[in-house]
Image: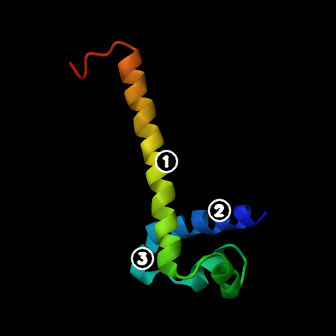
């Protein structure tokens, strides 16, 4: 359950950061977007910077997975893209 809330915060924050940027996004906005109080956010994260860091980590993992899938598809289908 606790991990689910943390993931909810990260997913919501990602959308807000994408729309308004890091500087203009507030922890209040993130909390409001998931119908929680600001103190609930601080239970899971120490700062807005920490939330942003986890958003970036999640995005990195997603992109790495997509790139790996694409490369594996190219390599195992006999593509000549890399030759």
67 sits to left or right of 31: left
Quadrant, the N terminus? bottom right
Q: Which residue is mark 3?
A: 22
Q: For this rendering, which residue is in front, 44 or 17?
A: 44
Q: Residue at x 53, y 82 (%)?
A: 47
Label 1 sits on a secondary structure element that is helix
68 sits to left or right of 54: left
Disc nearer the start of the sequence (3/1) = 3
How busy is the neighbourhood of tag 2: few (under 14 within 10 Å), some, or many (20 plus)?
A: some
**Residue reaching furthest top?**
78
Q: Residue at x 44, y 53 (%)?
A: 60
13 sits to left or right of 56: right
Q: Which residue is mark 1?
A: 62
Q: Position of residue 7 (x, y in %)?
A: 65, 62
Q: Which residue is mark 2?
A: 7
Label 2 sits on a secondary structure element that is helix
Label 3 sits on a secondary structure element that is helix
């Amino acid at each position: 359950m606790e991990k689910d809330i943390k993931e909810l915060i990260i997913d919501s924050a990602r959308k807000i950061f994408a729309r308004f940027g890091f500087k203009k996004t507030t922890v209040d906005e993130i909390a409001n977007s998931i119908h929680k109080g600001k103190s609930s956010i601080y239970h899971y994260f120490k700062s807005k910077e920490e939330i942003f860091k986890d958003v970036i980590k999640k995005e990195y993992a997603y992109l790495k997975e997509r790139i790996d899938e694409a490369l594996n598809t190219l390599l195992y289908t006999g593509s000549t893209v890399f030759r």
